[in-house]
Every structure is written in C-alpha cells, then in structure tokens.
Image (cartoon, helix red, strand yellow):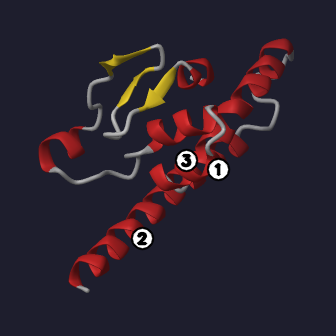
Amino acid sequence: MIALAAALEVRADQRVALRFCPGVVLPESCPSRSFLQVECAGCGLTRSFVHLAHGDFAASWSAHRLGWLLALAVVFQVPYRIVALRSENDTPLGRSFPGIVGWSLGLALIINWLIKLATDSIGRWT
C-alpha cells in the first residue's frame, strides 16, 4: 500500500494515475460515487494516501480529513505484523485492542462523512 501510493499521482482532474505514465488512470473504485454520485465515507482516501506519500499534507487533508490517520494505521501494521509473526502470541497487543482500533477508525470515518455531508448541504443552501 505504501509503495503503491508512492508510484501513483493525483492528476489535475482528481483522477489517480500511474506516476510515470499519467495516461494510465485507475478506474473509479467507489460504486456509490460511480452510480449514485454520492461520496461514501471512504471517498478520497486513495487520493489522500497518494498526496501523503509525496509529502503534500495540505492536499492530503483536502482529499480526506482522516487520510493521515488511516495511513498511520496502515504504516503501523508493518511492525505490528512482524512482532506478531516473531512472537508466540499472535496478538501482541491483546485480542481486544485491534478490534477497538478498527471500530474506532470505522466510527471516525462515519462521523467525518456525516459532518462532510452536513457542511456540504449547508454550503448549497447559503
């Protein structure tokens, strides 16, 4: 995931393409956005990860406010999995901690999405 983000770029039209072949554009991966024209809670995460991989934190924040947090969780998986593979205990942080983190990230995504929907709606009415 980390290496892939570095090999991609966000074009001016906000489509994600291969960095060294900008004509090779990734297909739209969100069915909600493709078919209903409504962004889901995860829309923008790929673009946010790509911007982070290139060090553009402002663009990452603009693409998705929680992209940095999800990217941090992905990066943390590497040492966590190495420790888990090397230890006799396959869950070095306990059985409940990974679940709590996963549910917390999911809840944060949903709350962020609801806030974005509300602010976008207010912006259209003013």
Residue at left 59%, top 43%? 70
- Classify mark 1: helix, strand or loop: helix
Considering every residue shown, the one lying at the far bottom of the view is 126
User: Which numbered disc flags the more N-terminal residue, 3 or 1?
Assistant: 3
**Label 3: which residue?**
60
Q: Mark 2 belongs to which amino acid?
A: Ile
In this rendering, which labeled residue sits more in front, label 3 or label 1?
3
Name the residue carrying label 1.
100
> In this figure, which residue is indicated by the disc labeled 2?
115
The N terminus, quarter of image: top right
Residue 29, percent from left and from top: 29, 31
In contact (CB < 8 Å): disc 3 and disc 1: no
Q: What's under tag 1, amino acid-wise? A: Ile
Residue occupying the far right of the picture: 87
| In the foreground, 72 or 18 | 18
- Please state, as top left, top right, bottom left or bottom right, where the C terminus lies in the image: bottom left
Q: Residue at x 71, y 38 (%)?
A: 95
Specify the quadrant of the image occupied by residue 30.
Answer: top left
In the displayed structure image, the side of residue 78 where residue 115 appears, left or right: left
Give the vertical position of 27 relative to 11 (above or below).
Answer: above
Reply above or below: 76 against 45. Answer: above
The one nearer the camera, 89 or 1, is 1
Is 85 above or below relative to 110?
above
Residue 123 x %, y %? 30, 78
Circle 3: residue type: Ser
SS at mark 2 in the image:
helix
Q: CA distance from mark 3 to mark 1?
A: 25 Å
Q: Secondary structure at mark 3?
A: helix
Nearer-the-camera pick, 50 or 87: 50
